[in-house]
């Protein structure tokens, strides 16, 4: 008589996408946190929330809250007068952190940690970065060629609108 033992499968968040999400968030916080202590405070709280949501709790909700705290830091930095180029880096970094963090949790829930997902995760991250760069380039071109020299807040809102439009197509 043979004894059958079950296989234990671990469904934790992907380290690759999670790490890339944290790198994106660090870039966002560094680009906007240098101009504002308030932005730096919100950014560091957001980084903690992202790390907690990805690597400890495997929670998409906590990842979203962490990303939103980083975004509040970006907005606070814009209110205090950060230039448009750094604002764009902060916004795109925040969006990439949210997208890649959500992807890390989703991949972890759907696949086990033993599944080879590296290629798909890098393709996802690259595609997201390319879309972010294209949106940022378009937004900066609109800002640069505007006749009245729109403030950085208008540029940030334009990027946010473009990202929401892209997200609506994705959903």
Image: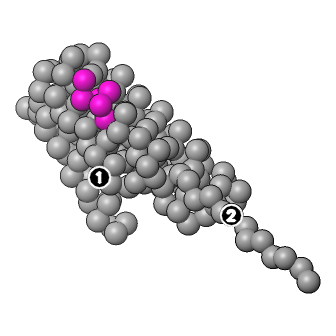
Q: Which residue is disc 2 drawn over?
A: 8
Does the image show residue 168?
A: yes
Q: Which residue is disc 1 drawn over?
A: 163
Give the structural element (helix, strand or loop) at label 1: helix
Magenta stretch containing residue 90, yes or no?
Answer: no
Horizontal and vertical percent for residue 147? 11, 33
Q: Which of marks 2 and 1 is in front?
A: 2
Quadrant (top left/top right/bottom left/bottom right) for the N terminus: bottom right
Residue positioned 58% across, 44% down in the render: 15
Q: Residues within 10 Å of mark 2 (few under 14, many from 20)?
A: few
Magenta part, dominant SS? helix
Residue positioned 48% across, 33% down in the render: 23
Disc nearer the start of the sequence (2/1)? 2
Magenta stretch containing residue 45, yes or no?
Answer: yes
Residue positioned 31% across, 35% down in the render: 46
Left-right relation of 146 to 124: left
Gap in angstroms between the C-alphas marked 2 and 1: 39 Å
Residue at the bottom extreme, as displayed: 1
| Disc ID at residue 130 | none
Left-right relation of 101 to 95: right
Give the magenta part as a residue range: 41-46
């Amino acid at each position: 008589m043979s004894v059958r033992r079950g296989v234990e499968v671990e469904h934790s968040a992907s380290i690759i996408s999670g790490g890339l999400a944290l790198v994106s968030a660090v870039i966002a916080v560094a680009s906007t946190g240098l101009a504002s202590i308030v932005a730096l405070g919100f950014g560091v709280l957001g980084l903690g929330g992202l790390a907690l949501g990805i690597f400890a709790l495997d929670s998409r909700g906590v990842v979203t809250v962490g990303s939103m705290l980083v975004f509040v830091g970006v907005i606070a930095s814009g209110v205090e007068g950060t230039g448009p180029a750094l604002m764009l880096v902060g916004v795109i970094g925040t969006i990439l952190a949210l997208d890649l963090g959500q992807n890390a949790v989703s991949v972890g829930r759907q696949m086990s940690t033993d599944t080879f997902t590296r290629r798909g995760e890098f393709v996802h991250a690259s595609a997201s970065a390319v879309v972010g760069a294209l949106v940022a380039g378009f937004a900066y071109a609109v800002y640069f060629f505007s006749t009245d020299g729109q403030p950085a807040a208008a540029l940030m809102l334009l990027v946010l609108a473009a990202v929401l439009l892209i997200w609506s197509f994705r959903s």
